[in-house]
């Protein structure tokens, strides 16, 4: 299957039936929106991702106004059970995990879309209680 095939074509052929946006899809959108070549758009997307990763590695919080913020949360060491080895207790070391908190504008935009699609999906039901 050609990786550069348009998103709709891949979906029709059953390659990715769920609605997942991939990095390649983002590159295509950036190329289209900014009138760049695919290679240039890929460099832009890579640079953004690398910038986010580097900032998080340095312990910095990233705020993208209206979109959201990324930060690192620290999970402490803990005792857990290994389900594959008859419940043997194992020590899980402390680790840092990325956390994303959506911004107010993003939440509002998602809820507007959800409300619009919900109003289209709800059929008109006659009121049977009115007499």
Image (spheres, helix red, strand yellow):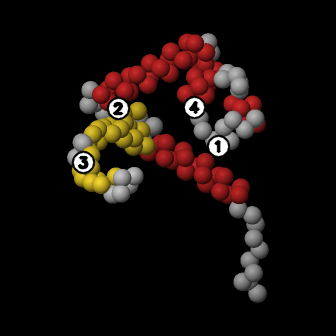
Q: Is residue 21 visible?
A: yes
Q: Give how far across and how far down residue 92 sits, in percent.
A: 27, 46
Q: Give how far across and how far down residue 104 sits, in percent.
A: 44, 45
- Distance (Cα) linking label 4 and label 2: 22 Å
**Secondary structure category for the residue under label 3:** strand
Residue beneath disc 1: 18
Residue beneath disc 3: 91
Q: Please, is residue 50 above or below residue 130 in the view? A: above
Q: Please, is residue 69 above or below residue 119 in the view? A: above
**Secondary structure category for the residue under label 2:** strand
- Name the mark nearer the viewer: 1 or 2: 1
Q: Quadrant of the C terminus?
A: bottom right
- Name the mark nearer the viewer: 4 or 2: 4
Which numbered disc, 3 or 1, marks the residue that appears first in the sequence? 1
Q: Residues within 10 Å of mark 1 (few under 14, many from 20)?
A: few
Residue 32, quarter of picture: top right
Q: Is residue 33 visible?
A: no
- Distance (Cα) linking label 3 and label 1: 37 Å
- Left or right: where does residue 3 sit relative to residue 90? right
Residue beneath disc 4: 22
Asked whether 81 or 111 is in front, the reply is 81
Residue beneath disc 2: 62
- Distance (Cα) linking label 2 and label 3: 31 Å
Q: Residues within 10 Å of mark 4 (few under 14, many from 20)?
A: few
- Left or right: where does residue 77 sit relative to residue 12? left
Label annotation for residue 112: none
- Name the mark nearer the viewer: 3 or 4: 3
Residue appearing at x 65%, y 52% in the figure:
116
- Distance (Cα) linking label 1 and label 2: 29 Å
- Left or right: where does residue 48 sit relative to residue 92? right
């Amino acid at each position: 299957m050609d990786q550069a095939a348009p998103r709709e074509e891949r979906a029709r052929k059953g390659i990715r039936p769920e609605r997942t946006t991939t990095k390649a899809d983002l590159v295509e959108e950036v190329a289209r929106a900014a009138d760049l070549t695919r290679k240039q758009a890929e460099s832009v997307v890579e640079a953004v991702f690398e910038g986010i990763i580097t900032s998080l590695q340095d312990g910095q919080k990233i705020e993208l106004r209206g979109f959201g913020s990324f930060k690192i949360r620290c999970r402490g060491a803990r005792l857990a059970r290994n389900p594959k080895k008859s419940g043997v207790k194992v020590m899980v070391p402390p680790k840092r995990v990325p956390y994303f908190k959506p911004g107010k504008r993003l939440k509002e935009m998602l809820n507007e879309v959800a409300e619009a699609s919900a109003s289209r999906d709800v059929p008109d039901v006659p009121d049977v209680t009115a007499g």
